[in-house]
Image (cartoon, rainbow, N blue to C red):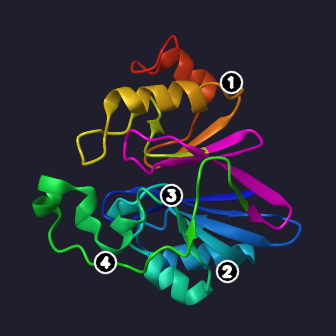
Amino acid sequence: MIIIPLVVGNLATNCYVVGDPETKKGIIIDPGGDAEQIMNAVQRAGLDIVAIVDTHGHFDHVMANEVVQELTGAPIAIHPADAPMLTDPKKGFGMFAMFFGNLPGGPPAEVLLNDGDEVRFGNQALKVVHTPGHSQGSISLVGDDVVFSGDALFQRSIGRTDFPGGDHHQLIDSIRRHILTLPDDTVVYSGHGPETTVGDEKRYNPFVRGA
């Protein structure tokens, strides 16, 4: 599997260009800004993008949805619980919205992803796992030896839960049941910060250590 990590947008969001090396079909996970940078990576890899997948609806993960969709023609996919944030970003931030200024809405989702669905691109597939807690529509994408965790799990940390739809206990439960049960050598590609592994987070993450 081709995996190209990019750091985009004002909040240093990790966007991932992911592809099938055989068919050159690919997806873009969390295009949070800097559409030109994302598309340059797509072109260098020679990929035909078949889906834009948002792990959740917060603006720093979706701000380049519109431009990337225009350039690729790919549908936008997200969990139904977070779909309203795509057209009205302030729904994801409640009283915190004032701190982010005027957040423009983007295009709506064309594909709604539920727990157990698959995102297919060429001969590759990622399983959709609903991991709420950071937001109610947060998902992780699980493949062979990899998981794209969005803002659920970070290296030595977890996602914040003080935005609307956030729930600390629910997030811990999501991580413990759906991410930390993966093999220890599974690489965790998070929504922010460096990659890590499931085994390292079991041992060293103070929020979930000992799970």
Q: Return the disc, 1 or 4, that comes first in the chain's sequence.
A: 4
Q: Is residue 1 visible?
A: no
Task: Please identify, in this view, whether the residue under mark 1 or under mark 4 is nearer the observer.
Answer: 4
Q: What is the x, y in percent for residue 172?
A: 43, 27
SS at circle 3: loop
Asked if marks 2 and 3 touch (Cβ < 8 Å), the reply is: no
Q: Amino acid at mark 1?
A: Asp
Q: CA distance from mark 4 to mark 2?
A: 27 Å
Query: Which residue shows up at 53% across the image and 89% down it?
Result: 70
Seen in the picture, residue 11 relative to 165 is either above or below; the reply is below
Q: Where is mark 3, residue-wise?
A: 79
Query: Which residue lies under the disc numbered 4?
Result: 105
Give the labeled residue for mark 1: 184
Return the residue nearer the eye: 165 or 61.
Answer: 165
Name the front one of labels 4 and 2.
Answer: 4
- Which residue is located at x 48 percent, y 15 percent? 209
